[in-house]
Image: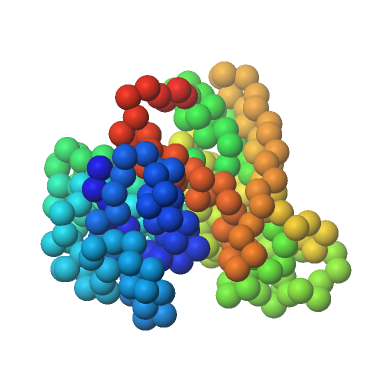
Amino acid sequence: MKIGLIGYGTIGREVAAAIKDGRAGRAVLVALLEADKKKLARARDEKLASTITADADEFFGADTEVIVEAAGHAALKMHAERALRSGRDILAVSAGAFADEEFYSAIKRTAEEHNRRFAIPSGSLAGLDAISAGAIGEIDKVTLTARKPPAAFKGTIAEQRASDTIDETVCLYDGPAREAATLFPQNVNVVASLSLAGVGFDRTTIKLYADPKVIRNIFELSARGEFGEVSLKLENIPYPENPKTGHLVVMSLIKAIRRLDDNFVVGF
């Protein structure tokens, strides 16, 4: 399975290494697209793909079958339709981009027209399988509470409110998932995935906290519906160089790549 990877940040580097080491199944990294000059230089130094470029035309000219996106909302919006129209399937981590209803509709339409698959891994949250199954019936409530160390909000609109100097928990957002996905694009892709799996962005709610007492990214999911009730808690260990991203996000994406080519699947 020939992979084209978009993005060589924390997630992209780990995924590329997993493909090289064989942890992503029978995948081969053929092409890498990275717009940032420093990250691009690093990728070229590490020589993990035959085509490593900042040029989208060169990237899409490579012989790939599946495009893996690990570069953020803007990159997904820029390249997703082209990937589908060119006959590739997509695995994408930036689920929050679908808070944009126009983009969501366009991608669904394009995937159907070209008979391609657009897939979003479960990412940093357990329980999406239960929510998506429960959504076959009626779901009354889906709420996610997220607690992260203040460092996870550097570079966001809440950076000052969530500075390293705070000594008590600060609620940064409490409301519908759609607005949260737009305000915190690097922090709440998880709630976007939850929304897409269940009752949508407007009926899914999130409470987002900066908590100086925690060192992990903590998610607590609560849902109730025709199926019954579910509640779970996950404590995700973040990457030191990028506390917005947890290890489980990367592991989930690697598992998804492997599953594309698996002959025996559990939990489908």
For the C terminus, which image quadrant? top left
Q: Is residue 235 above or below residue 214?
A: above
Q: Position of residue 29 (x, y in %)?
A: 30, 54
Q: Residue at 33% across / 67% down in the picture?
A: 47
- Residue furthest right in the image: 167
Q: Is residue 145 above or below residue 265?
A: below
Q: Residue at 45% across / 23% down in the picture?
A: 266
Looking at the image, which is closer to me, 215 or 16?
A: 16
Looking at the image, which is closer to me, 266 or 120?
A: 266
Q: Position of residue 220 (x, y in %)?
A: 69, 41
Choose top left, top right, bottom left or bottom right for residue 256. Answer: top left
Q: Position of residue 8 (x, y in %)?
A: 40, 66
Choose top left, top right, bottom left or bottom right for residue 4. Answer: bottom left
Q: Is residue 107 above or below residue 122?
A: below
Q: Is residue 176 visible?
A: no
Q: Residue at 34% across / 29% down in the picture?
A: 262
